[in-house]
Amino acid sequence: MKRSSNHLADGREIIYFDDTETAPRTAVDSRDLPAQAPRSEIRRDPLTGEWVGMAAHRQSRIYKPPADLCPLCPTSPGRPTEIPESSYDVVVFENRFPSFAQGVPALPSTVDGMAMVEQAGGLGRCEVVCFTSDHESSFGQLSPERVRTVVDAWADRTRTLSALPGVEQVFCFENRGEEIGVTLHHPHGQIYGYPFVTPRTELMLATAREYHAEHGRHVLGDVLAAERAAEIRVIGSTEHWTAFVPAAARWPVEVHLVPHRQVPDIPALSDAERDDFGGLYLDVLGRLDGLYDKPLPYIAAWHQAPVRVGREHSWLHLQVFSVLRTTDKLKYLAGSESGMAVWVNDVTPEQIAERLRGSE
């Protein structure tokens, strides 16, 4: 893989990750863009202790452009985009409308008129990851070699964002499909550098610490061993990874891809583990698309260790889930899920695992 970086017209960084050696990436962004001035902030909910991001400038972000105006396609004559080059393999650039960013203004420590609500600038970084220059493709149509390039890009960006001021956790993810809320259809994902440890991660770390104190082992390690032994919910496995439907799945379609070795984050994966991941993940994505004989809307979320805390109790894994519960019905987060965070699934994990094993 070859890595090279440049800057866009408004100063944002863009990084190219090419599968093989290429000519230098020196194309210039010809657009006349206003200087970046993000005003992200975070506020802590006094009832739950959770941080909430505020990013009002995102209201003006690009929304469902036609394919011929896609900002993630390569630049062509007379049509400049976010990527100045005329072609690319994998490219990462700073989000033009970030939820978190470097250089945000400092704020008073509490909200005006509400001293019990802490606030701070939303210090962090948000990036866009384009998996291919082909607008009509998808992650599931990538070659194993390209998946490896994407994994290396995730690792590179996780290391870089983890070293930035204010970043406490790095989250790599992909949203696919309008049902999920996607507004740009070009195959892409995002990376968030959060200024706090996310609530889901804090809960998983607390559970892992408690389990380790009682059993002397990692809870996900025991889950993995039990799933591999039972085979009831396993979708596929390789030398270094296993994919299975979790026994307490929240979503109507949900698969976890877990490395057999405990590692805290993507950069810690070995070359063999990075190579091995692609084949299994592409197989899983193919099965997901075969479930209803159409492209499945999904979220693919990498659970990585925080930058500074809990790394010894973290075990990297990828969670892939969908809101589509039948061919034409969505699972909405209704009163129990949205109001009380108590999930009710309309299908058992064993049923979905059986259907996925048969949907090649």
Image (cartoon, rainbow, N blue to C red):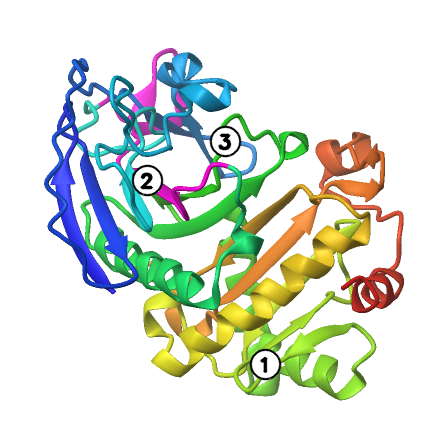
Span highlighted in magenta in the image:
107-135
Q: Amino acid at mark 2?
A: Glu
Q: Is residue 111 above or below residue 82?
A: above
Q: Quadrant of residue 348?
A: bottom right
Quarter holding the N terminus?
Answer: bottom left
- Name the spot of residue 254 as percent of width and height, x first: 71, 56
Instruction: Give the label on residue 46, or none.
Output: 3
Instruction: Give the label on residue 269, or none.
Output: none
Q: Earlier in the sequence, mark 1 or mark 3?
A: 3
- Count residues near mark 1 (Cα–Cα under 10 Å), then give few for <14, some for 14-19, many for 20+: some
Residue under label 1, please give it.
221
Q: Dot 3: what SS?
A: loop
Q: Earlier in the sequence, mark 3 or mark 2?
A: 3
- Name the spot of residue 42 as percent of width and height, x first: 37, 29
Residue at screen point 20% across, 61% down? 2
Q: Is residue 29 above or below residue 302?
A: above
Residue under label 2, please give it.
127
Q: Amino acid at mark 1?
A: Gly
Q: Dot 2: what SS?
A: strand
